[in-house]
Every structure is written in C-alpha cells, then in structure tokens.
Image (cartoon, rainbow, N blue to C red):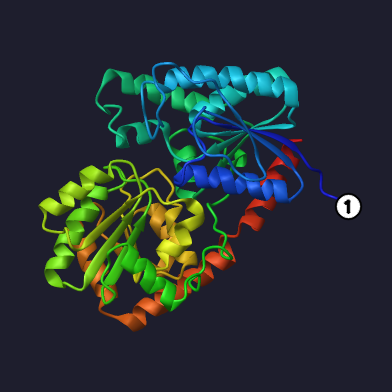
Amino acid sequence: MARRTYNVLMIAPTSFFLDYGCHVRIAEESWILEKLGNQVTIVTYYRGGDLDGVAIERTRPIPWRHDYEVGCSRHKLAFDVLLSIKSLEVALRRKPDIIHAHLHEGALIGYVLSKLRGVPLVFDFQGGLTGEMVDHQFLNPDGAFYVHMRWLEEVIDHLPQAIITNSRHAADLLRGEFHCDSDNIHIVPDCVNTDVFRPDVLSEEERLSLKAQLGIPPERKVVVYLGLLAEYQGTHLLVQAAAHLVKARRDVHFLIMGFPGEEGYRAYAHSLGLADHVTFTGKILYKLAPRYLALGDVAVSTKISATEGSGKLLNYMAMALPTVAFDTPVSREYLDDWGVYAERGNPAALAEALGSILADKERATALGVGLRQRAMERYSWEQAGRQILGIYDSLC
C-alpha cells in the first residue's frame, strides 16, 4: 500500500537559510520530505538564501531593519507580525494538510493557522524559549518579565497535537518542567548526510593546498570548530582553551569557522598571543563545510547551553573526527562513549582533553571511526523523514 503524501506548510521564524544550527535542520527535513514525495512550502523572514528544490515564501521587509537577525532581538516582534500575515496568506492559497512550525514563535503562529484551516499542528522544538533567551543574555532570570515569558512558553508547548524534539534531554525538559503529555512528544534527532560529510572528501594534495590558502603551516595539527560564534556557544572559552594548548605544544592550529563577530574574537585571540595559531574564516557555506572540516585532526564543540541541540557534532561524527565537547546531556546523547568530554565552562580542561587526543593518534583514529559508524547507523535523514511522516499519519 502506498504511503500518503502531504502538503506541508513550514513556518520558520528566522532569516532562512543561513549556514548554521536550526537552519540546517529545517533544510534537511524539507529536502527529505520532498524526496519522499511530499510538497513543502517554507514561510520565513525576508532575508536569507534560497534552497534548490524547496519553495520559500518570504515576508515583506521592515523599513528600519535590513540586516540579518541571529539570535534574540527586539525587532523580532515586528518580523513575527509580518510572518503571521504572510503565513495566513500562504495557508489560504496553498491549503496545507499539516502545519509544521519551528521554534516557539512559529508554533504560536501555526496554532492560529491550524485552527483556521482545521489541520494538525506539529511543533519542531529545538530548545527552551526562556532558557535560550537567558543564554543569549536577552532575558534576566531574576527579572519580573521572566515569569511572564516562562508562562507563555508553557502555554505554547501545550498548543500542538505533536511535538518533535531533537534529543531525549529536550523531551525530558518538556515532560518535567513544562508538564507536556509524553504521548505527544516524539524524538527525531538531528541527522547528517554521511554521503556528503565523509572523511575522504579531500585528497592529500587538496588538503595541503587548502591549508596553504588559509595560512596554516602544513605540519600543524588542526583543531576545527564550525558553528555560530557567540558567548552562549562558548567561543570565548574556545579561544582561552587555544591559549592554554598552544603554550603546551606549538604544533597546534585552531581553525574557527563561523559568524558573527569574528573580528572581535580575532582581536581577542591576538591579545592572548595566538595570532599565528588561530585562523577565523567567517561564514562557511554549508555545501563547502565538509572540505574545511576535512582539514581537522580533532573537532571541538564548546556549546554551554543546557537546552539547545548541537547539530555540529553530527557533522564532526560523519567526518570521522575525534571530538571533544563540554560535558552536557546533549553532547553525551550524540557522542556516547566515543566522545571526549571536558568540564562544562572550563577552558583549561578543554585544552587538556584536546591535547590528550592529539598526543594519541591510535586512540584518535579509533574514536573517529566509531563516531562515523554511529552517525551512519543512528542518524540518517532517510530514517528521520519516515519517522516524521509516521507522526503526520497519526494525526491525519
């Protein structure tokens, strides 16, 4: 019997597509749903890149803010009003079978549309709203406004017929802190395309050539980081860890790839004497990420948020990179026994963990092989797509 296919309206309250985090999940979910025969339309803010094979509908711009939005901003309220209007217009025109909303703002907009259209709402939960606002230093946990935002978050979490989370930790958060019904929560982890992210993506000649282009001496061991640069991502701690490690061994180079604020972090690294041992690339296109990650001898994740996912770990895993991460529930969920962990927020411990991997090539290779095998067995987008369709089926 042929599986039913769906006309899906995705709501993405962000400047989609940018080359990081939740954008990658939205893109990969859309691609696999299209591949499995469904029709996906993404409604998003007016800025961002287009995607091959996916229909994207954008809001009108606001006259006083024409640049990209990354993270929390007071301007998002105006963006979300425009997104609500655009989502309603697209829903009336496209007549979706499912509203698939990302992030809490998307779920709130999607709830109204689901009631107007009489179709189910699926909420793609990618982290706690108030927790992330605190991480971004946009909300004071001791302030009066926090209580109201926490109440709103709990209300939104109870609106959808189904919630998709990217980790067991997120599911536990929804059950334990926000009292959501376990039957409505479905864990669909972030995944990775292991045919694209693979360790043999560069020849040795290409690897040396790219190193030279980036100003990395050929004999250096390379620590790679790919993701957003921000305090809640632990970027300052990564730079401090680099300073610790470079003091211990001069044959190490840190390749830090991402945005925004790379100039500020570059200046900070130079102030710590790291000018010759750190390269900041700025934004790396998602399609080019495997080539740059292939330069790494070890990968690092310094995310200190306790609620957000960490999709970069899957890219590292697929590249067979031994990976060092701060000890968080999400890191352990992805890396399991194949990860190397450092005390959360401790740059000296992070440097020590990185040094231990660089000093033991045999162990590094074994960890990398184990991580790639784990990515191939557990984190396939094909499997995730069929799981999402199973959720749709249960609601329709």
Which residue type does callout 1 highlight? Met
Q: Position of residue 337 (x, y in %)?
A: 41, 69
In the image, 98: left or right of 351? right
The C terminus lies in which quarter of the figure?
top right
Query: Can residue 118 be seen in the rendering of this structure?
Result: no
Question: Vertical placement of 204 versus 108: above or below?
Answer: below
Q: Position of residue 154 (x, y in %)?
A: 47, 27
Foreground residue among 95 and 149: 95
Q: Position of residue 318 (x, y in %)?
A: 50, 65
Q: Element at badge 1?
A: loop
Most extreme residue toward the right, as rendered?
A: 1
Question: Vertical placement of 199 versus 231: above or below?
Answer: below
Foreground residue among 190 and 260: 260
In the image, 336: left or right of 255? right
Q: Quadrant of residue 57?
A: top right
Q: Position of residue 288 (x, y in %)?
A: 48, 57
In percent of the image, x 21 and y 49: which residue is there?
266
Foreground residue among 295 and 145: 295
Instruction: Read off the residue under disc 1.
Output: 1
Most extreme residue toward the bottom, as rendered?
A: 362
